[in-house]
Image (cartoon, grey):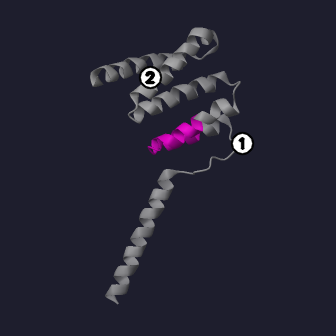
C-alpha cells in the first residue's frame, strides 16, 4: 500500500513538473491572423516569462505581417534589439540598434521618436559592456 502511494505521488509530481515546463515554453506554432496589438501582447507575455526566443519570433512577425505600419515596425525592431540585450548578446543587440538608428538617419521624420531615444540609451550601455569585455 505504501509502495503504491509512493509511486502515485512520484507520478503526480512528474506530471506536474512536465506540465509546468510545457506551459513556460509557450506555443511552438504562432497562430496566423493576429492583429498587431495581439502580436505585441503575446511577445510581451513571452518576454515576461523569460521566453525571449518566442518573444523575438512574435516581434519578427510585425514587419512581415504589417510592413506599412511604420510605428509598430520601428517598435518591434527596438524590442528585438532589447531582447538580444536581455539574452546577454550585446554584439547582436548593438548591431540591431545601429540598424534601427540608421533608419532614423534616412526616415527619421516618419518614425516615432521614443524608440530612438531608448535606442540611443541602450547603445551607450551596450558599447560600455563591449568595451569592458575586451
- Label 2: which residue? 94
Residue linked to disc 1:
33
Q: Mark 1 falls on what kind of element?
A: loop
- Quadrant in the picture for residue 11: bottom left
Which region shows up in magenta? 41-59
**How crowded is the residue under tag 2: few (<14 C-alpha within 10 Å), some, or many (20+)?**
many
Q: Could you tell me which residue is drawn at 46 percent across and 29 percent down?
A: 82
Total tally of numbered discs in the picture: 2
Give the image location of residue 63, x and y in percent: 65, 29
Within the magenta stretch, is there residue 55?
Answer: yes
Is label 2 in contact with label 1 (beta carbons under 8 Å)?
A: no
Residue 81, placed above or below residue 47: above
Judge the density around disc 1: few (<14), some (14-19), many (≥20) Cα neighbours within 10 Å: few
**Residue 103: quadrant of the picture:** top right
Pinpoint residue 22: horizontal percent, then vertical percent. Answer: 49, 58
In the rendered image, the quadrant that contains the N terminus is bottom left
Residue at 52% x, 15% y: name it. Answer: 101
**Of helix, strand and loop, which mostly describes the magenta segment?**
helix
Amino acid at each position: 500500500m505504501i509502495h503504491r502511494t509512493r509511486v502515485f505521488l512520484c507520478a503526480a509530481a512528474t506530471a506536474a513538473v512536465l506540465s509546468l515546463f510545457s506551459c513556460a515554453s509557450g506555443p511552438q506554432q504562432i497562430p496566423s491572423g493576429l492583429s498587431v496589438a495581439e502580436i505585441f501582447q503575446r511577445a510581451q507575455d513571452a518576454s515576461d516569462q523569460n521566453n525571449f526566443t518566442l518573444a523575438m519570433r512574435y516581434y519578427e512577425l510585425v514587419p512581415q505581417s504589417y510592413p506599412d505600419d511604420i510605428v509598430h515596425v520601428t517598435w518591434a525592431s527596438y524590442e528585438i534589439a532589447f531582447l538580444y540585450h536581455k539574452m546577454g548578446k550585446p554584439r547582436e543587440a548593438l548591431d540591431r540598434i545601429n540598424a534601427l538608428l540608421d533608419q532614423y538617419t534616412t526616415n527619421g521624420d516618419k518614425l516615432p521618436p521614443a524608440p530612438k531615444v531608448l535606442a540611443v540609451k541602450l547603445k551607450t550601455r551596450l558599447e560600455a559592456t563591449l568595451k569592458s569585455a575586451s
